[in-house]
Image: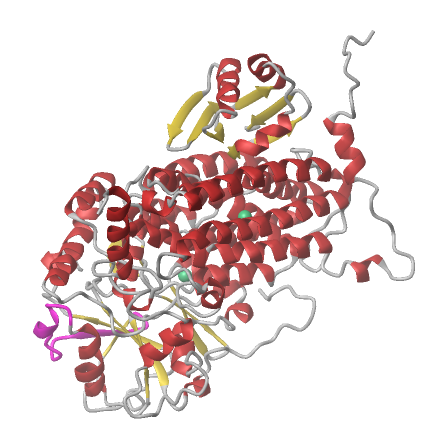
């Protein structure tokens, strides 16, 4: 199984996002570098709107992710509730 | 395979010999002396003597290397386009059959660069 | 019974469908082929343009909203940087030279990417890809502008930042990235998408923007890291577009496979050659280093690219053959590229230097198979000679590769002690390339590469001197004339960092910033 990843800038906006991603994807690993964090996961990674909203206490549109996104790897499928990265092999 | 194009695709080469004002390009690299990161490009008249290439132009380019003073041109081996080749020092580039954009490599057995690292 | 009290607007999928479909029309008084002349000549067959789907499902309204947010954040940081003399917060003035190379070698290409995606958007008959290309075109001009704005702060204080646009079209090493984009832009829209959308964005930009930008943060350059990450946030979308484009072509018609494979092979290699510059930026030009070039390569190319090619295998796509060479090259190219710039440092618009002992120890730890064996003795020799006042500057122009336009500095596969020479003949004329990869590209389309504007040959043809120069005049100095034509400030922009005006100014200003004298 190949790894997918997503990287975010490290700031106050992304702290709860990263927390939510790691909670929802127990197989994911966060690797910090200066100013950024890269989250790697075998096979797939799912980011859930609900989990982020619970942590930040307000509505969240998954498209807001783009503001602090640095890079991704894998096929993306995004709808209103989930932002999913996966490799099909 | 030809370029896929909407129209006829034909252009003259950017570096044809007639663009060099009577001179021709010749490239020379010194094997196992990577202190010089790449072979040198010379633009020389075809009547340049091969001895001048070695003693003047190459000496100017390669002279910084501490091995240069030990180069004995009577023992140097040459490659032209990767094949063994034997120059005659008293002849000109044209007489030796060197064409525009030919590439020469010279090898100096026994000389292995800085600390023997081919540098 | 709907429990959701909020009035739900259109869902993302519906909104995307409404805003990217049915926006076009069939022409009536001109045939479609004449309106979209570039849609078919490359041989790619598309049967249903509506099968194109942007996985981000981004629509123009959301695009403007989030891009505006990114810009606000970025410019707030740039203002703070300028107001607080941020330039004095960097680790070491040597670092600035990486930023100079970025401004001259990369930012102008963002602008070319802007033009190229505008053209691709114009030339594709399908609305989905047109919308995606439009967004990317606007992104790319944003990248170019924000980079110029961010870096212009340094132009107030340091050398070499003053004329990037003029330099791009003239300077020998800038012809490397420039020719990459010229090659892509002069192809058709589908090849452009593979060249830039896929190879450059998906396979390669991670290496440029992620570890290098993190390195900029590590070196205290808040301006660069901010524009870098701001650009890379768009890049995530661009990579997705590139990957989507590949899948789309492969799913539309089986006849597309060999054409797509050929382009992947070509552009992977072209991109890897350009990345040699980034390799040396990471290993040599960052005073504080996050990771080595080799480590970045392993993470972002081998692992990530490996996952990608494993995935594309179901369409019949094979890993480009030239990539086996890269496994060997990753341990050499940064050292080989830096050695090249060091010796041609008289003709570069940035400073070069030899690493100190501590840096050399880091390089041997990161490159245990190669650094001590092939490079350390050379670099130590140069450093010792420089200390004796005999700093090495090569005085003769190098031979260049006809395709990638890099000096012929790469070594033979399996033997890093010998330069790799490859030769082709086309219509009675000889052409030289640096590798099997470049030779293969040349041999496939020789008509294209016979036109290469090779800086060394152009200089010898007399095309690189200021107007009115008489090369036959007594005492004519060709190097000085070329630098003049490049708009280099000879003696300030070029040469060694040691003894440079940048070095002196940075030390003096930092002293003023930290002391009351
Ligand atoms: Fe860009
Ligand atoms: Fe090449």
Give the prevailing secondary structure in the magenta stretch. Answer: loop
| Location of residue B14 in the rendering, given as x and y in whole percent from the top left corner | 49, 77
| Location of residue C286 in the rendering, given as x and y in whole percent from the top left corner | 31, 46
Relative to residue B105, is residue A50 drawn left or right? right
| Location of residue C140 in the rendering, given as x and y in whole percent from the top left corner | 58, 50
Q: Which residues are magenta?
A: B64-82
Judge whether residue C257 can be spotted in this image. Answer: yes
| Location of residue A51 in the rendering, given as x and y in whole percent from the top left corner | 58, 14
Identify the residue at horizontal 43%, vertical 44% (top origin). Answer: C83
Name above or below for residue C449 compared with residue C502: below
Identify the residue at horizontal 39%, vertical 26% (top origin). Answer: A31
Residue found farthest to the front: C517
Name above or below for residue C48 compared with residue C171: above
- Residue C337, image quadrant: bottom left
Q: Nearer the viewer, residue C316 or C479?
A: C479
Name above or below for residue C6 compared with residue C413: above
Q: Nearer the viewer, residue C24 or C391?
A: C391
- Residue C397, image quadrant: bottom left
Indicate whether residue C127 is drawn in magenta.
no
Identify the residue at horizontal 38%, vertical 74% (top origin). Answer: C456
Judge whether residue C199 can be spotted in this image. Answer: no
Q: Nearer the viewer, residue C230 or C397?
A: C230
* Image quarter (top left, top right, bottom left or bottom right) of the N terminus of chain C: top right
């Amino acid at each position: 199984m190949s790894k997918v990843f997503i990287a975010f800038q490290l700031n106050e906006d992304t702290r709860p996002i990263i927390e939510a991603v790691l909670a929802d994807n127990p197989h994911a690993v966060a690797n910090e570098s200066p100013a950024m964090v890269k989250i790697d996961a075998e096979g797939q990674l799912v980011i859930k709107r609900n989990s982020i909203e619970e942590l930040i206490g307000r509505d969240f549109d998954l498209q807001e992710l783009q503001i602090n996104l640095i890079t991704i790897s894998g096929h993306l499928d995004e709808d209103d509730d989930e932002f999913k990265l996966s490799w099909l092999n | 395979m030809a370029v896929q194009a909407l129209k006829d695709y034909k252009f003259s080469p950017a570096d044809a010999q007639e663009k060099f004002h009577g001179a021709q390009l010749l490239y020379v690299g010194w094997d196992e002396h990577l202190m010089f990161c790449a072979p040198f490009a010379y633009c020389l008249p075809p009547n340049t003597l091969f001895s001048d290439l070695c003693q003047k132009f190459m000496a100017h380019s390669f002279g910084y290397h501490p091995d240069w003073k030990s180069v004995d041109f009577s023992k140097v081996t040459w490659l032209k386009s990767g094949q063994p080749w034997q120059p005659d020092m008293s002849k000109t580039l044209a007489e030796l059959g060197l064409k525009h954009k030919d590439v020469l490599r010279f090898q100096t057995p026994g000389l292995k660069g800085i600390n023997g690292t081919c540098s | 019974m709907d429990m959701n009290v909020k009035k739900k607007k259109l869902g993302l999928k519906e909104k995307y469908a409404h805003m990217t479909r049915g926006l076009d029309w069939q022409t009536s008084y001109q045939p479609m082929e004449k309106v979209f002349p570039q849609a078919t000549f490359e041989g790619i067959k598309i049967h249903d343009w509506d099968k194109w789907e942007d996985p981000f499902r981004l629509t123009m309204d959301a695009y403007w909203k989030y891009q505006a947010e990114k810009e606000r954040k970025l410019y707030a940081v740039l203002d703070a940087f300028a107001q607080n003399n941020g330039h004095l917060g960097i680790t070491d003035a040597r670092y600035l030279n990486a930023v100079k190379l970025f401004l001259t070698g990369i930012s102008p290409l963002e602008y070319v990417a802007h033009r190229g995606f505008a053209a691709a958007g114009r030339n594709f008959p399908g609305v989905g890809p047109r919308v995606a290309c439009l967004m990317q075109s606007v992104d790319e001009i944003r990248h170019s502008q924000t980079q110029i704005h961010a870096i212009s702060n340094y132009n107030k204080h340091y050398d070499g930042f003053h004329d990037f646009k003029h330099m791009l079209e003239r300077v020998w090493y800038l012809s490397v990235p420039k020719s990459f984009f010229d090659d892509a832009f002069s192809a058709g829209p589908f090849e452009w998408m593979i060249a830039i959308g896929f190879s450059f964005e998906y396979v390669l930009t991670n290496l440029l923007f992620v570890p290098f930008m993190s390195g900029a943060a590590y070196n205290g350059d808040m301006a660069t890291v901010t524009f870098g990450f701001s650009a890379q946030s768009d890049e995530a979308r661009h990579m997705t577009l590139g990957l989507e484009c590949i899948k789309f072509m492969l799913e539309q018609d089986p006849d597309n496979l060999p054409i797509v494979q050929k382009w992947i092979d070509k552009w992977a290699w072209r991109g890897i050659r350009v990345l040699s510059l980034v390799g040396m930026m990471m290993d040599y030009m960052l005073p504080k280093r996050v990771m080595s070039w080799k480590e970045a390569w392993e993470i972002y190319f081998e692992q990530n690219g490996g996952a990608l090619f494993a995935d594309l295998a179901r369409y019949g796509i094979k890993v480009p053959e030239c990539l086996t060479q890269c496994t060997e090259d990753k341990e050499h190219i940064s050292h080989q590229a830096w050695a090249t710039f060091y010796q041609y440092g008289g003709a570069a618009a940035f400073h070069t230097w030899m690493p100190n002992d501590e840096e050399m120890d880091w390089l041997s730890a990161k490159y245990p198979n190669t650094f001590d064996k092939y490079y350390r003795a050379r670099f130590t020799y140069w450093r010792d000679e420089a200390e004796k006042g005999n700093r090495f500057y090569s005085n003769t122009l190098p031979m260049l590769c006809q395709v990638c336009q890099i000096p012929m500095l790469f070594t033979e596969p399996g033997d890093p002690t010998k330069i790799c020479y490859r030769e082709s003949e086309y219509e009675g004329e000889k052409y030289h390339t640096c590798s099997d990869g470049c030779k293969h590209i040349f041999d496939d389309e020789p008509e294209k590469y016979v036109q290469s504007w090779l800086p060394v040959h152009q200089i010898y043809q007399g095309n690189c001197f200021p107007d009115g120069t008489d090369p036959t005049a007594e005492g004519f100095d060709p190097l000085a004339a070329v630098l003049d034509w490049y708009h280099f400030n000879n003696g300030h922009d070029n040469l060694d960092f040691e003894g440079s005006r940048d070095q002196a100014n940075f030390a003096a200003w930092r002293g003023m910033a930290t002391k009351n004298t």
